[in-house]
Amino acid sequence: MGRALRFTSREESIQHELLTNLIGVGSYQDIHDVLEPRVLQLCGADHFALGCANLDGSVGLQWTSRTTMPLLQRYSEWVTNDFVFKATLAQPNRVLTTPEMLRGQTLDAQETRQRSVEAGLDLKQVMAALLIEEQQGLKGGLAVYSERDRPFPERSQRLLQWLVPAIHRAVSHVQRIHAQGLELDLLKAGAVESGALLVLTSWGREMVRTNAATRLLEKWFARSDRTPQGIPKAWVDRVAKLARLPGMIPPALLEDVRDENGEQLQVTFSLSTILWAGNPLWQVRIVERPHWVREEWELTNAEREVAEGIYEGLSDQDIALKRGTSLLTVKGQVRDIYRKTGTSSRTQLIAEGRRR
């Protein structure tokens, strides 16, 4: 198939109509309805089937066909015995014909042929391709069938191959629409509470993450403590453990607190009201509590140390001993702290610091 393919005016008209109608499709059914009549015309085929990755994330393809569903409706039960699947999996994104897939074997000896006959279909020739992307895996599949003995001509194979990128784009568009809708639903479900939000499956796959969550994860967790996707490994283990627990979950397992340099990260795990692929999702709510000493107070390092002593309930004398300085120095620093913060007592200082 090395020669440049020159289209006839009829082929160009069908292709233009097909590409135009694929723009903005909203569902897999829309893609099928656009493709079927035009692909049958271009390839001289009798039947067409489109398979697309399940939108709920479950394994396998969701097949749509006007005429071959009796063969494909339970496809997952015998897919590994299908010579079409084996061949197209080995050469993804390439349209293959029956002779290329059989490689010298006879069609009548194949389970696929036997099942098609049992389904009331006399399918003798097929052209098919599996659509696979390196980063996202299996996207879909397509197949055209003929009831004639003669294999599809090379021109039909090349015409169908020419359409593969456009079908890729259409399937990806529908998947993006669904993903955006799911993300919006998850964000709405999580908007009733404050804090950054991360939504995980029970096996640790990220479904939604707000920008605020990303900032906090990068601040509080070293790269070595996070998965390649940036999720804390401890949280992946936590949701996996929570998902395995039967009955009531101990409240302590639904919370996590980290303290560092006077700041605190409070984490709460809860089940989302939304399921994905029939599985529960876990909301991870993240709230950062900044240091109680306000930045706008502009205390010096020494004054912050004295303020920490006050926060811990130490007397001026205890603070002086702890810092290795004189009581007179500490008393002067306490006066400076009160002046800068507009407070006049230990109790008021701590209360104003906590009030944010």
Image: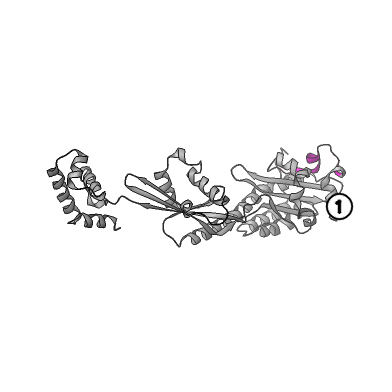
Left or right: 268, with 81 as reference point: left
Q: Position of residue 62 (x, y in %)?
A: 69, 54
Which one is in front, 228 or 176? 228
Q: Secondary structure at mark 1?
A: helix
Whether residue 106 is visible: yes
Relative to 68, say whether 155 is above or below. above
For the residue pair 45 and 218, the one nearer the viewer reads as 218
Specify whether residue 122 is in view: no
Relative to residue 298, is residue 273 drawn left or right? right
User: Neighbour class for label 1 at 10 Å: few (<14), some, many (≥20)?
Assistant: some
The part of the chain drawn in magenta is 94-107
Asked whether residue 69 is drawn in magenta, I would say no
Q: Callout 1, which amino acid?
A: Val
Image quarter where the C terminus lies is bottom left
- Image location of residue 36, percent across then percent down: 73, 56
Quarter of the image that includes the N terminus: top right
Residue carrying label 1? 117
Q: Which residue is painted at 24% across and 50% down in the image?
A: 313
**Is residue 102 one of those drawn in magenta?**
yes
